[in-house]
Image (cartoon, rainbow, N blue to C red):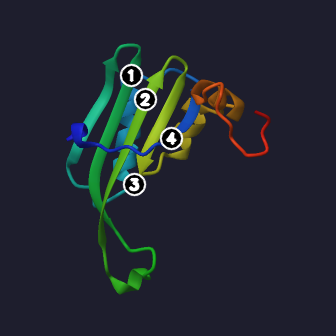
Amino acid sequence: MINNLRVGKTANFHRLKRALSNAAVDELFRHIRSAQPSASQNLFHHRREREGDTVWSAISFLYARSPAFLLEEAAVRERICGFLLLVEHRDYIAVFRSKLDMPAGFVTRYLGRVPTERIDIAIAKQERRFSKNSPA
């Protein structure tokens, strides 16, 4: 199923405060699943797969929740499919996600801020112009 994953072009980039271990990723995935009491079986689950110098982890499952536009008393549930993909490279991590939230404790313990200019340097081509007012 992971081979059918279509990931958007946006990600959150972080500096790793400490290295992730198999146990840390397992705990993260357990916490994410436990936040959704109606979680189904995983559509996919990959823990710390190596691809060259990069390590990636991913999870996806279905769960039910009340639609945002209806009160709980309406007793209507919608089925949601969420996923989380972590891509570790050196001391950095890119987080791709849809409809699943990362627990604050994990973020605080493992993820640090990356200055915007560091991301721009990493992904922008030298000739790229970001606004019409930029000098050529």
Furthest residue toward top: 52
Q: Is residue 98 visible?
A: yes
State if disc 1 and disc 2 touch (CB < 8 Å). yes
Dot label at residue 87: 2
Estimate the spatial distance between the alpha carbons at disc 3 and disc 4, rounded to whole Å: 22 Å
Percent x, y for residue 29? 36, 40
Amino acid found under the numbered disc labelled 4: Ala
Amino acid found under the numbered disc labelled 3: Ala
Name the quarter where the N terminus is drawn.
Answer: top left
The earlier-in-sequence mark between 3 and 4 is: 4
The earlier-in-sequence mark between 2 and 1 is: 1
Estimate the spatial distance between the alpha carbons at disc 4 and disc 2, rounded to whole Å: 10 Å
State if disc 1 and disc 4 touch (CB < 8 Å). no
- Taking the image as shown, residue 112 lies to the left or right of residue 44, namely right
Estimate the spatial distance between the alpha carbons at disc 2 and disc 3, rounded to whole Å: 22 Å
Q: Which residue is mark 1?
A: 55
Q: Which residue is mark 4?
A: 11
Q: Which residue does the image show at 37% across and 73% down from the upper left?
A: 66
Q: Secondary structure at mark 2?
A: strand
Judged by depth in the image, the label closer to the viewer, 3 or 1, is 1
Estimate the spatial distance between the alpha carbons at disc 3 and disc 1, rounded to whole Å: 25 Å
Judged by depth in the image, the label closer to the viewer, 3 or 4, is 4
State if disc 1 and disc 3 touch (CB < 8 Å). no
Furthest residue toward front: 136
Q: Which residue does the image show at 55% across and 30% down from the upper left?
A: 110
Dot label at residue 35: 3
Amino acid found under the numbered disc labelled 2: Val
Judged by depth in the image, the label closer to the viewer, 2 or 3, is 2
Percent x, y for residue 130? 68, 41
Q: Secondary structure at mark 3?
A: loop
Q: Which residue does the image show at 39% across and 74% down from the upper left?
A: 67
